[in-house]
Amino acid sequence: MSPRSFLALDFETADIRAESACAIGLVKVTDHRIVGREHFLIKPPSGKSGQRSKKPDFMFTYIHGITRAHVAAQPCFGELWPKVAGYFEDIDFVAAHNASFDRRVLLACCDQYGITPPKVPFLCTVQLARATWEIYPTKLPNVCEHLGIELKHHEALSDAEACARIVIHAHKKAEAPAFPMPPQ
């Protein structure tokens, strides 16, 4: 039995703090078809409550191109959550490239705003690509090139869609009738 529905997710962060998400890409897949996709810019928090206020450094602008000016009028994660939460409903797992990073960002953002995080397992497409195609290196551009997937790297929606397509490709390649589910 294959997974019926999953969410591919990608965060971009302003700086080294996990709660400094400045963009999120979400791609929902049901029965091997992309059925929804969204991209949001996010205004990162100034600092955790009880700490001295600290503006996000935007030290990673050189990677993703997002600046403080791009997100100044955008909602913070807590304000955005009602629009995002529905993507986590009725899914078997969340897929992300280097899933430990995106999981850490999701949990930190939820914690920052007192949101109960979704209780879903994560599947890492780095590990999936290594196990399925023995690809090395397994950076997202390498995997996408190997599979012929279009990618605008470090654009959250493009990265999330690439992850979705990696999972779909892996399922189609699987010879066994059961698709390996992520560990609990």
Image: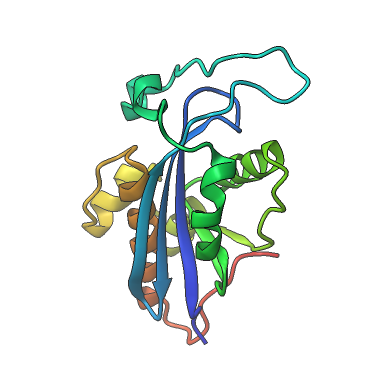
Residue 91 sits in which quadrant? bottom right
Q: Is residue 120 above or below residue 81?
A: below
**In terms of depth relative to the viewer, which is nearer, 153 or 156?**
156
Instruction: Name which residue lies at 52% across and 83% down.
Output: 178
**In terms of depth relative to the viewer, which is nearer, 79 or 36?**
79
Instruction: Name which residue lies at 45% across and 19% down.
Output: 58
| Residue 56 spot, x, y in % from top left | 53, 19
Q: Is residue 46 above or below residue 168?
A: above
Q: Indicate the colouring scheme.
A: rainbow
**In terms of depth relative to the viewer, which is nearer, 80 or 126?**
80
Instruction: Name which residue lies at 48% across and 31% down.
Output: 43
Q: Is residue 151 above or below residue 7?
A: above
163 sits to left or right of 121? left
**In terms of depth relative to the viewer, which is nearer, 159 or 71?**
71
| Residue 118 spot, x, y in % from top left | 66, 59
Instruction: Name which residue lies at 55% across and 15% down.
Output: 55
